[in-house]
Image (tube, coloured by chain):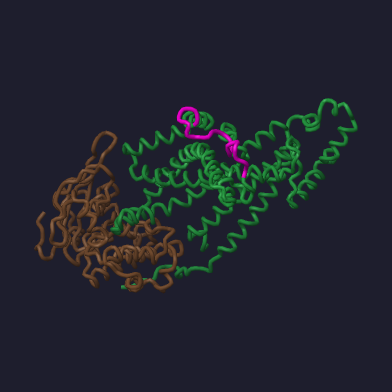
Amino acid sequence: MTTVDTGAPRRPRVPSFVRYLARRLVIALGLLLGSTVVGFLLVQAVPGDPVAANLSDEALGDPEAVAAFEQRWGLDEPLPVQYLTYLGNLVQGDFGMSQHTGRPVLEDLLDHVPATLEIAVPAFVLSVLLGITIGMFAALRHGKAADQAVRVGSLLGLSTPPFWMSLLVLYLFFFVLGLSPGGGRLSPEFSPPPTVTGLYPVDALLAGEPMVAWDAVQHAALPVLVLTLVTTATLVRFVRSALLEVLRKDYITAAYAKGLPARTVRHRHLLRAGLVQIMTMAGLTFASMLAGTVLIESVFAWPGVGNYAYASASALDRPAILGVTVFVAAAYILINLVVDLLYGLADPRIRLS
Amino acid sequence: MSVDSATDELLAVENLAVRLPGPDGPVTVLEDVSLSVRRGEIVGIAGESGSGKSMTARTLLDLLPAGAEVSGRLRFDGAELDHRDRKAMHAVRGHGIAMVFQDPTAAMHPMLSIGRQLTEHMSVHLGLTRKQAKARAVELLEQVRLPDPGGALRSYPHQFSGGQLQRIAIASALAARPKLLIADEPTTALDVTVQAGILGLLDSLRSELDLSVLFITHDLGVLAALATHTCVFQQGRVVESAPTADLLRAPEHPYTRALLAARTDPAEVP
C-alpha cells in the first residue's frame, strides 16, 4: 500500500549563502557608520571642556591661544560639520591627534591593540578549549558531584573581581614564588623588537632574539592566566547550559537509540548542535577581550587598549576616546560578521534557506 | 501471561518493573509488565500519556534517565538480555531493536545531512564502507517510498515535510537491519492524510522484511487494522492483553472500554 504525502516534495533550493553574507555585510557597514555617529555624539557629552583640559592655565588666559586650539580641532564649527569632517578623515585612516600623547590616535591604537591581542588571543583560545571541555564534562554528569563542583568552581571564578585575582596571582607568582618577571611587556634590560606584527614574542623570534621572545612570553603569562580564568568561568556556565538544552532533544536520544558510540553522539551530534550558541557567546567574549580589560591591564601595567582607553578618558582626550570607541565597535561588528559566517557554515537551515 | 512457542518469539518481557528517582524517593513507573512479540508480528501498546508506554520502549533500549531501577526478565532473539549489563543492552540498540519517534522533525538532527544520519550507524553495526552504506541508504529510501533518494541524501531535515521525514526516520531505524522496530506514536505529529501512508508503510515493511513492530499509540482504533495483539497500559501496568480483534470487540477491562469510548475518530467527524 502506498500513499502519497500531501504537498509536493520540497527539493533543496539553490544555496543562497552568498546573499546571506552580502546582507550581513551591508548590515555590518551600516552598524559601523551608526557607531561612529553614536560615538561622536557621546563624546560631545564628555564632561569638562577639552580646551580647559588640554591647555595650561597660562594659555587659557590668552584668548588667541584658546581660539587657535579650537580652530585646530574644529571645535568652533557646528556639530554636523564637525562630524562630517571627522568621518571624512576617518575613512582616510586619520583618527585625529591624541591630545594627551600628542601622537596620531591611529599610531597609538597600532601600539596598544597588538599588546591587547598578545594576551587576548592566547586567553581566548585557552578559555574556549577549557570552556567547551569542562562545560561538556559537567553537562554529561548533570546533577552529579562533578557537575556541582564545576558549577561552584565557575561561580567562584565568575564572582572573583578580576583586579583582585590579578593582584593575587601577581603576589603569588612574582613576590612569593619569584616565577614571574612582574608587570609590563618586557624586562627593562631588553628593548622591544622591530615591529612586524606588534606581538613581541612573534616579532622577537622574527628578529632572531629568542631570549626577548621568552621574556615577553613570561610577561604575558600572568595576564593571560587571569583573563583565561575569568573567561573560562563564563564560558563553562554557558556551554553547560547550552548542552543541557541540546541533551534534552529527541535527536540526541535518537542518536543513542541508533546504537552509535557515546563518543560519536557527543562530538558529532551534541557538540555540533550546541556550537551555534557557543560560537555567539565566544564571539562576544573575544570582542570584550579586544575592548581591553582595564582592571587586568592596569594591575599588570600592560599597555593595551584598556589602559589607553582609561588614560584617554582621564585626560578627556576626545579624539582618543572616539578612536577607541570606533575601534571597539569595529571589533564587535567584525567578530559578529565572522560568527554569522560560521553560523552559515555550521547550520544548513541558514545556509540553504 | 503465557509465552508463545519459543522459536517464533522475538521479544519476551516478563514482570518488568521500573522505578525512577523522584524528589520524594523512587517513583514506580512500570510494574509487573509482561508482553511478547513474535517474528513478523505487530504488537500494539495502547494507553494514555503517562501510562508507561514510552517507558517500556525506553527500558528496552536502555534509554532511561540516570538512577532508574529496573527489575524483571528480558529475552530477545532467543537469548536472555540482562538489563544490568549495559554493554549487552547497547549492543542491541539500533542493530537488534530500533526506534522511530513521535515527532520526526525533532528526532532528526537539524544540522546533519540525511545521508549522514542514514549511514552513520551502518558502519558501526554492519561494517559497511562509505560507498556500500550510501548504496544501502538509497535502497532504504526507495523502500520507504521517498521520491528522489539520491537528492534526499544530500539534503537536510528542514527541507522535508513531516510525513517525508518520518519515512526517512523509518529508513534510518531500519538501516542496521534491526529485528524489532519500536514505533512510539509515529503518526501522532502528522496530518491525518499522511498517517495512513505511514501505517501502510509499516505494515508492508513488516511483511517484506519479516520485521516485528511494537507500535505505541494512545489511539486504540489505529491498532485495529495493524496489530495482531494489543496490550493496554494504565498507570504503569498492563491491564488487558489480548488479540486486537477480540479486545476491540469485547473489551474486558473498564479502562479499555473507557479508552474506546474516548476515542474520536477523525474520519467520523463531519
The chain letter of the green chain reads A
Residue A6 sits in which quadrant? bottom left
Residue at 35%, 55% in the rendered image: A265
Q: In the rendered view, does B219 fall on the left or right side of A289? A: left
Q: In the rendered view, does B134 fall on the left or right side of A103? A: left
Magenta-span inclusion, residue A178:
yes
Total numbered badges shown on the rendered structure: 0
- Main SS of residues in magenta: loop
Q: Where residue A149 appears, x then y in whole percent? A: 36, 35
Q: Where residue B228 appears, x then y in whole percent? A: 19, 63
Viewer-nearest residue: A18 or B77? A18
Magenta-span inclusion, residue A292:
no
Viewer-nearest residue: A190 or B7? A190
The chain letter of the brown chain reads B
Residue at 28%, 58% in the rendered image: A259
Q: Where residue A124 appears, x then y in whole percent? A: 51, 45
Q: In the rendered view, does B246 fall on the left or right side of A239? A: left
User: Is the C terminus of chain B in the top left, top right, bottom left or bottom right quadrant?
Assistant: bottom left
Instruction: Please indicate, yes or no, whether residue A238 appears anywhere in the rendered image.
Output: yes
Instruction: Please indicate, yes or no, whether residue A159 appears anywhere in the rendered image.
Output: no
Using the image, determine if residue B154 lies above or below residue A231.
below
Viewer-nearest residue: A83 or B77? A83
Q: Where residue A338 appears, x then y in whole percent? A: 56, 54
**Magenta residues (range):** A174-192
Q: In the rendered view, does A139 fall on the left or right side of B3? A: right
Using the image, determine if residue B204 lies above or below residue B97.
below
Residue at 80%, 29% in the rendered image: A52
User: Is the N terminus of chain B in the top left, top right, bottom left or bottom right quadrant?
Assistant: bottom left
Q: Given the current orientation, which residue lies at the most extreme right position?
A: A64
Using the image, determine if residue A333 lies above or below residue B180.
above
